[in-house]
Amino acid sequence: MTNTKQLLKLTGLAALMGVAFTTPARAEVSPETAYVFNTFAFLFSGVLVFWMAAGFAMLEAGLVRTKNTTMQCTKNIALFSIACMMYYLVGYNLMYDGVDGGFIGSFSLWGADDNAALTGDFSGEYAAGSDWFFQVVFVATAASIVSGTLAERIKLMPFLAFVVILTALIYPIQGAWTWGAGWLDEMGFSDYAGSTIVHSVGGWAALVGAIILGARKGKYTADGRVMPIPGSNLPLATLGTFVLWMGWFGFNGGSVLALGSADAAIEMSNVYVNTLLAAAGGVLAALVLTQLIYKKVDLTMLLNGALAGLVSITAEPATPVPGAALLIGAVGGVIVVITVPLLDRLKIDDVVGAIPVHLFCGIWGTLAVPLTNGDASFVTQIIGIVAIGLFVSIFSAIAWIALKASVGLRVGEEEELVGLDKAELGMEAYPEFSGPKVA
């Protein structure tokens, strides 16, 4: 600010003296410097999104009962590792290699090619490995969504088998349609950081899985009543939500895909602000609405309200003004409060509320893009939502049904009663609660 005032004074003095005075042109960074900053943005943002894996694990561990905590932690670290392996083996090239306005890339092993940059040609704009690293953590996010919904009654190995299918085939193929410059991209479908491409994909897969798997024993009575099954550790779930909120700055901010210019830095700053405010809007809407409906504030609704706001703004965090971002997130918070009990009325058992957050708010966020981005069309957005929803639902159903018919999906009633920690893993998260006491 001081430098600006001094420049104005000098300009005015020079004008009085009849001396020409021009403002220096903005210096352009070198291609190599831009390459370095772009690469750093991918890597740093990827680390933030990687940290979201811890958020999902802690959120799920807090919202399940103590007897299933170890299973949720096991699923989350295993699914992340599977996602990394499958995206390396086939997923990345299936999503990005030679899509050219079509439906699918190539079935081939990914490998980094930085030879041009090593010889001084920085036209690639960023290191190849940084792009792969940033993309792979998004794949794992989609799989994490499924984990929470199906908690407390699904076997470990069939679940992980589905993760293989989701991360190797389902996610990359639909991702190629937009981010891989496929047919939806040619139409103008817009999804900045993945409200549909990441979040609703996980939501559709989770919804289909929940319907085929069925509800937990005792969740719904024969006369239609819903029996609450509270989580074991709300402080842990709250920590997980804050971790996810933090990681989301990398999720949306990194999707600027550049940091090598002032324009990119300004856009990233705007994305961070809008991401923050949308989450706050989701929390506040859930707070007010639960107080009005239930006469008491529901912490779990507030946690999901934050995530709902984040998912809602993910489709377009760059173009809204801050007030609009706050409102977009607030609508997400309302959606969660309304749809969580709606799923219960339909007897669809979603343990952590992932379907309302990631599917319903993913749809809302994608539909909201044209409200602030004049280049987007409601018709095209609807086409993208429907096409991706149908594709993911159909192929998820095939996978879930095949797994159910071949190896089975559910643990037995006795195993569900005992808990998956003991029945499936033989290892409890809180052994002092049930094991022999040691003096």
Image (tube, rainbow, N blue to C red):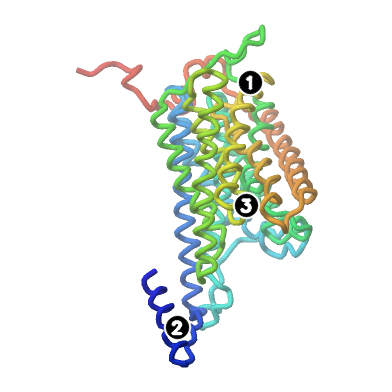
The residue depicted at 49 percent of the width and 56 percent of the height is 46
- The residue under label 2 is 11
User: Of all residues shown, which one is farthest toward the front?
Assistant: 16
Q: Are marks 3 and 1 in contact (CB under 8 Å)?
A: no
Q: Are marks 2 and 1 in contact (CB under 8 Å)?
A: no
- Which x, y percent locates residue 336? 60, 31
Label 3 or label 1, whichever comes before in sequence order:
3
- Which x, y percent locates residue 176? 70, 56
Rendered-image quadrant of the N terminus: bottom left
**Callout 2: helix, strand or loop?**
helix
- Which x, y percent locates residue 415? 52, 18
Q: Is residue 31 above or below residue 151?
A: below
- The residue under label 3 is 316
Rendered-image quadrant of the C terminus: top left
Q: Nearer the viewer, residue 46 or 188?
A: 188
Q: Which mark is residue 344?
A: 1
Q: Nearer the viewer, residue 391 or 79?
A: 391
On the image, which quarter does residue 308 sit in? top right
What amino acid type is highlighted by mark number 2?
Thr
What amino acid type is highlighted by mark number 1?
Asp
Mark nearest the camera among 2 and 1 is: 2
On the question of residue 158 being in view, the answer is: no
